[in-house]
Amino acid sequence: MACEVKTTCPYCGVGCGVIARVDDDGAVSVKGDPEHPANFGRLCSKGSALAETLDLDGRLLHPEIGGRRAGWNEALELVAERFLQSIAEHGPDSVAFYVSGQLLTEDYYVANKLMKGFIGSANIDTNSRLCMSSSVAGHRRAFGSDTVPGMYEDLELADLVVLTGSNLAWCHPVLYQRLAAAKASRPEMKVVVIDPRQTMTADIADMHLAIAPDGDVALFNGLLVHLTTSGAIDQNYVSAHTTGFAEAFAAASALNLDGLSAATGLAQKQLRDFFRLFETTEKVVTCYSQGVNQSSAGTDKVNAIINCHLATGRIGRPGMGPFSLTGQPNAMGGREVGGLANMLAAHMDIEKSLHRDQVRRFWGAPAVASKPGLKAVDMFRAVADGRIKALWIMATNPVVSMPDADVVEAALKACPFVVVSDILRDTDTTRHAHVLLPSLGWGEKDGTVTNSERRISRQRAFLDAPEEASADWWQLAEVARRMGFSEAFGHASSAEIFAEHAALSGFENDGRRDFDIGAHASIDRAAYDCLEPFQWPQPKETAPQEGRFFADGRFYHPDGRACFVPVQAPKARLADDALPFTLNTGRVRDHWHTMTRTGKSARLSAHIAEPFVEIHPSDAQTIGVADADLVRIESPCGTVIVRALVTARQAPGNLFAAMHWNDQFASKARIDALVPPITDPFSGQPASKNVAVKAARFAAR
Ligand code: SF4
């Protein structure tokens, strides 16, 4: 009989509610859930094509060892044995998990528990490191916690929305639709887009600031100085609720207007107009995403933005605040359970002995890792140099998506033991696995995800598990049992894991943590199945709290105040005649990550059919390239050959290429092979937006 199931889109961090319908003949169709508070019935092109991506072509349906089909028991025994062997011979830090914002929170929770609590290493990191870890670091420096203060509604309530480093129209399309609809209904509302490219998002902007790559710290420092000198600082708020304003102001004052203009690439009039608009508009939301985070100064950029909101007290109130937009569907859920190598579960701090002890006692763990593990780029370095001898990769394709992707591939080839859990049998990464474990895909798996506004929603199964595919949490728990940790990994369902996760969040928590969903600690299967989308926190003792953080001016630093962080504009990269262009990497509207799912939809693939590079007409003329010619792009790390898209939307001297395609599509199409492994010193996030390259017309022989 036909049925309808409410679930959540598996692509971007907007986290739209989806109603999936399965007809009597098994045909699946999807529509937006009109009751879901993220999208109110809307879906973007990717979300509406979900039903086109559910076939079993190319699926990994059975465990494999060395390319031959194996039984689950044999495969799980081998994984447990090889991990135990490596730990016994080389210590717990010789093994690692590289996981993904595609995992459900329950998968993430079990992976983190096994690695940090029972293996005793913190070598678990996630591809979300590539997406939003600079925001996490910036939040923690400013607020004492990794807390997104606002909610989506704020974009509709604001009188000024500043979008910096965010192509919202393509990367968070439903949120863009909400913003565009709000702007259409309130003509007085202003939108400023700060981006080196004139993206589709800029089409609704009242002001587009084509900022120089990595000019954001200078811009927001300049804004802080302007707000101060124009008397727009909320002195009462700063005095009562913050520390460090004088130091932040002193650091921000390093550049005068000429210096600001040079550092940002913006005319002084543009700077003055933007500063004045921000100064005179009370309700301001500043949204930022990969263009801010993916930088060697990403954390400083985040704090430069937050500094301006703290200085004006514009935080935690309707239509006001800094707002980090996460890229992945469950980047936020991974943060909640400690999916980053430098965090513990439930937003606890791995470097605090009190937190380690709480987690250890709650889990009944022998010892909790006492120092941060290796972050993504460093983890693959450790694989390359032999420190990591056993690696388990889950739901991600690092051979395409990691910086210095050629080196990552070579590292996997050389690694003594690689396990990959995936839904597909043949990806650039699965080819290097000694053991392949078949996982459940969207529509088959069952659990929760958290979107950018801290809203936890259910992903529900509406399809049977194909062949032997199984949940990632089950695979992890089965390996844990075989490693001798049966008692702590006896979970029988995702509902049990969610309840344990909720209980830990409220365990011995007397208001010291932002993340607390202890109200769900006793949830049973029936209640879990009916769980409606909700925002955290939801502590046990109080009524549900939907909405914003910090309205009361209380933060999570020990003194209860927020911190201004003094930040200085990074030095511009020196001009290099050998590498004259700056490559900015990103995404297109209709594909997701390495296209393992969206590539199945002919409709989505028709939007942009092949890998490309955007280049300004003057640069194209300089290197003798016409539209649709092939272009060879080289960095010290690698080479790609892609199609030229000549467009004045691209700033002169800058190139843009999307990271979705791989070498299976066309030889030399992996854009991330060009990106050097340079990272932000606080977050470890790679700098994927400012890559020195050269470009030339490619004439195929
Ligand atoms: Fe899915 Fe994001 Fe599109 Fe919503 S906006 S339908 S979450 S891809």
Image: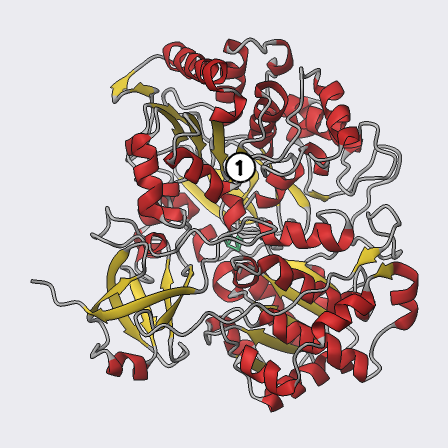
Q: Residue at x 67, y 33 (%)?
A: 344
Specify whether 102 is left or right of 286. Answer: left
Query: Which residue corresponds to mark 1?
Result: 374
Q: Residue at x 55, y 8 (%)?
A: 484
- Where residue 460 sits, quadrant-wise, is top right
- Looking at the image, which is closer to me, 44 or 297? 297
Q: Amino acid at mark 1?
A: Leu
- Where residue 347 sits, quadrant-wise, is top right
- Looking at the image, which is closer to me, 257 or 608? 257
Q: Give x and y (percent) for residue 123.
A: 54, 31
- Where residue 494 sits, quadrant-wise, is top right
Whether residue 563 is visible, yes or no, is yes
Tally of numbered tags = 1
Specify whether 481 is left or right of 342. Answer: left
Specify whether 638 is left or right of 507. Answer: left
Q: Residue at x 44, y 29 (%)?
A: 388
Question: What's the coloring here?
Answer: secondary structure
- Label 1, residues with CA under 10 Å away: few <14, some 14-19, many ≥20: many
Q: Give x and y (percent) for residue 109.
A: 61, 29
Q: Give x and y (percent) for residue 420.
A: 39, 29
Instruction: Indicate whether 305 appears above or below 6.
Output: below
Give the quadrant of the C terminus. Answer: bottom left
Q: Residue furthest bottom?
A: 269
Instruction: Indicate whether 187 appears above or below 592.
Output: below
Q: Give x and y (percent) for residue 120.
A: 60, 22
